[in-house]
Amino acid sequence: MKQGRVVRTYGGYFFVYDFETEEVYRCKIRGRLKQNDIEVIVGDKVEFQELDEGEGIIEDRLERKNRLFRPLISNVDQVVVTTAIREPDLHFKLLDKLLVLAHAADLEVVLCINKVDIPGLKVTKDEVGFYEDIGYQVIYTSATEGEGITELKDALKDKISVFAGPSGAGKSSLLNAIQPDLELQTDNVSDKIKRGKHTTRYVKLLELEHGGWVADTPGFSRLDISFIKPRNLQYFFAEFKEHLDGCKFNSCSHSHEPQCKVKTAVEDGVINEQRYQSYLQLLEELKENAKEDWRR
Ligand SMILES: Nc1nc2c(ncn2[C@@H]2O[C@H](COP(=O)(O)OP(=O)(O)OP(=O)(O)O)[C@@H](O)[C@H]2O)c(=O)[nH]1
Ligand SMILES: [Mg+2]
Ligand SMILES: [Zn+2]
């Protein structure tokens, strides 16, 4: 039996990249899988049989590492959280929200700060530096001038990646800079409207020539974090981890409680104040959404 990865679905067909021959087969799927509610989506590793030249049938889905909902895709390794230094302005609350979403989905994160050709890089580096202290890989790029593109390419190598970040940050431009033949639409509003709501449905994995895959639609197309339980938010702020144990209350939400190790770390400057404010704000949002008592 052959093994491969679903890289695209269209019109009831599954296009499967054969790991061995590196060719793409157009496959149907066994009715048995559907009957057993075994969903097969882009990103899935599957076992399949060759039927005809270039055609096949999927017999089984192999184990999954994870599954994103919008876009619908599985087995993603990492998200490249992309923001611009300006145009649009760097929005730290949004950045922290994206990081939370990435961690909630159990994805690795690369932080990409784009448009470094626009004046103001030094200020941005001062503002963004603490993300490196937390342990994030930060790559400074210019899609238009080519800066940092090699480093970004290296970060994508042999992984399945999605990009995420505000509209206009330069996600499509970066992909085009990495590999011009990907020919993604950039900044073309009328095209976006035309493709409209079907883009997520037809998510595709594009093959990078130096190894690896990248989804053609941004990850987390909706910034909905309401599925996160308020009490779990603390685990998605990586730098909180080593301070979570010693709080006076087991159920400490690290907001209003006395003798809180996280708050102490903030006061001591070990945890960045701005990040802590992001945490508090997201916590409020989640509690509001869930209308759930923290201790429940
Ligand atoms: N100066 C400068 N402009 C850039 C850079 N990268 C992208 N742009 C411009 O920024 C605009 C938006 O770029 P896109 O690549 O379409 O942005 P996007 O993140 O894909 O946006 P959405 O698809 O709407 O989410 C375009 O006009 C690009 O030419 C850069 O590094 N420097
Ligand atoms: Mg785009
Ligand atoms: Zn606490």
Image (cartoon, helix red, strand yellow):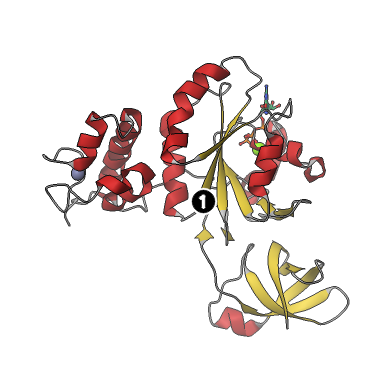
Residue at image point 50% right, 17% down:
123
Quarter residue 283 falls in: top left
The quarter in which the C terminus is drawn is bottom left
Q: Residue 55, image x and y in percent?
A: 82, 75
Callout 1: 10 Å neighbours few (<14), some, many (20+)?
Answer: some
Task: Name the one closer to the observer, 5 or 195.
Answer: 5
Q: Can residue 172 be spotted in the picture?
A: no
The quarter in which the N terminus is drawn is bottom right
Residue at image point 50% right, 53% down:
107
Q: Residue 159, image x and y in percent?
A: 64, 55
Query: Residue lying furthest top in this view?
Result: 119
Query: Residue at label 1?
Result: 108
Q: Can residue 227 be spotted in the picture?
A: yes
**Three-letter code, disc 1:** Glu
- What is the count of numbered marks? 1
Does 164 appear above or below 250?
A: above
Q: Residue 57, image x and y in percent?
A: 74, 79
Does 159 appear above or below 64?
A: above
Residue at image point 24% right, 30% down:
268
Residue at image point 26% right, 51% down:
231
Is residue 208 left or right of 35 when viewed as pictured?
Answer: right
Q: Residue 144, image x and y in percent?
A: 73, 26
